[in-house]
Image: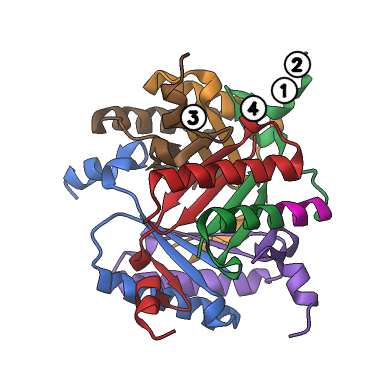
Chain colours: A purple, B orange, C brown, D green, E red, F blue
Amino acid sequence: MPLLHVTQTPGQSAEAKRELLKKLTAAYVDATGAKPASVWVTIEEVSKDDWAIGGETLTERALKPA
Amino acid sequence: MPLLHVTQTPGQSAEAKRELLKKLTAAYVDATGAKPASVWVTIEEVSKDDWAIGGETLTERALKPA
Amino acid sequence: MPLLHVTQTPGQSAEAKRELLKKLTAAYVDATGAKPASVWVTIEEVSKDDWAIGGETLTERALKPA
Amino acid sequence: MPLLHVTQTPGQSAEAKRELLKKLTAAYVDATGAKPASVWVTIEEVSKDDWAIGGETLTERALKPA
Amino acid sequence: MPLLHVTQTPGQSAEAKRELLKKLTAAYVDATGAKPASVWVTIEEVSKDDWAIGGETLTERALKPA
Amino acid sequence: MPLLHVTQTPGQSAEAKRELLKKLTAAYVDATGAKPASVWVTIEEVSKDDWAIGGETLTERALKPA
């Protein structure tokens, strides 16, 4: 029954995503006792040009000196 | 005023989507009496690699014997 | 696998919601051939004070002459 | 801490999106006094074939005489 | 056609929300030239117990010395 | 930068939620190497009357013999 929706920037490999989906499911099950089969997780990718923090896109922020 | 947001995997033709959007709108109107023009429906597609049930992606689950 | 998320204003009875959930599920199954058991539908209620069209809340719009 | 999620159709340039992200952030800060760095804004693009109003996709509506 | 969805913590008055909804709508119209009547904005409130940054809820973070 | 949004039914204590938020954040960090402070997690609660699987609400399903 629980839905976990992950919004992140692109760039993760299919394999790394499998790992992420497994670990998030396991963490939810561990914390709540839910049945694994009841846990749905989806990943949505938002480009760094379409994501802003403090009015600056992640692309702009990545160009600034650390 | 109502918003219906559909999250599904890719693969549906534009024509099939038109049909789906019509039928969901009609179902909402039928169940609630809302004006059709007030009903918004959007479709978001999530790849089978980005969707997990029980920690397994839909891609992995499709490879397993039924 | 499909997720249908309905965002609407409060006021619908539990019975009317059951009807809505049934009809939306049936419409999705009818339009796509999906298995009913794979269709998840959730309803989120947003107050008329928290919903604006054209900058006016649904509460403000309801007070204006038709 | 606030999250602003924009759902719109494709077609906006990266530059126009930067402008939109800045203006939405500034509007939120202006209206609430929140710290700019706390405001996250994401943009999701939904195709005109995947968006319906009154059961008609935005693509169908655009083909009809005004 | 655009949808703006704001997720924030509770505590804002109805009047302050009206102001926020107006300003976000105006900012969207200003940045894109969209018709005001086409802009939908909804506000969802998430409690500080239900929102975490770095694994700490906003409630926990508020208790820590600045 | 990543956003994790959990949709679940009500009933979890504030303490259990803190645990869930911590474990999901840790799982994301472990799987991706992201900085903990960059991980936002929000929880949205949807009542069992507002959540259907296969056209039946979770309330209706809970009343049926296992």
At x 56%, y 76%, the residue is F38
Quarter of the image for residue A50 reads bottom right
What residue does disc 2 label?
Answer: D64
Q: Position of residue F47 (x, y in %)?
A: 29, 47
Badge 1 crowding class, 10 Å Cα cut-off, few under 14, some 14 to 19, many 20 or more, is few
Q: Chain of mark 3?
A: B
What is the distance, in whole Å, between disc 1 and disc 4 at their CAs? 9 Å
Is residue B10 in view? no
What residue does disc 3 label?
Answer: B1
The amino acid type found where label 3 is placed reads: Met
What is the distance, in whole Å, between disc 1 and disc 3 at their CAs? 20 Å
Q: Viewer-proximal residue, A21 or E28?
A: E28
Q: Viewer-proximal residue, B25 or A59?
A: A59
Q: Are marks 2 and 1 in contact (CB under 8 Å)?
A: yes
Determine which of the numbered discs, if any, sits on residue B18 in the image.
Answer: 4
Which portion, as a residue range, is magenta? D15-20
Q: Are marks 1 and 4 in contact (CB under 8 Å)?
A: yes
The amino acid type found where label 2 is placed reads: Lys
Q: Chain of mark 2?
A: D
What is the distance, in whole Å, between disc 2 and disc 1 at their CAs? 7 Å
What is the distance, in whole Å, between disc 3 and disc 2 at their CAs? 22 Å
Residue D24 lies left or right of residue C63; in this view the side is right
Q: Position of residue B34 (x, y in %)?
A: 44, 20
| Secondary structure character of the magenta stretch overall | helix
Residue A10 included in the magenta stretch of the image: no
At x 55%, y 20%, the residue is B37
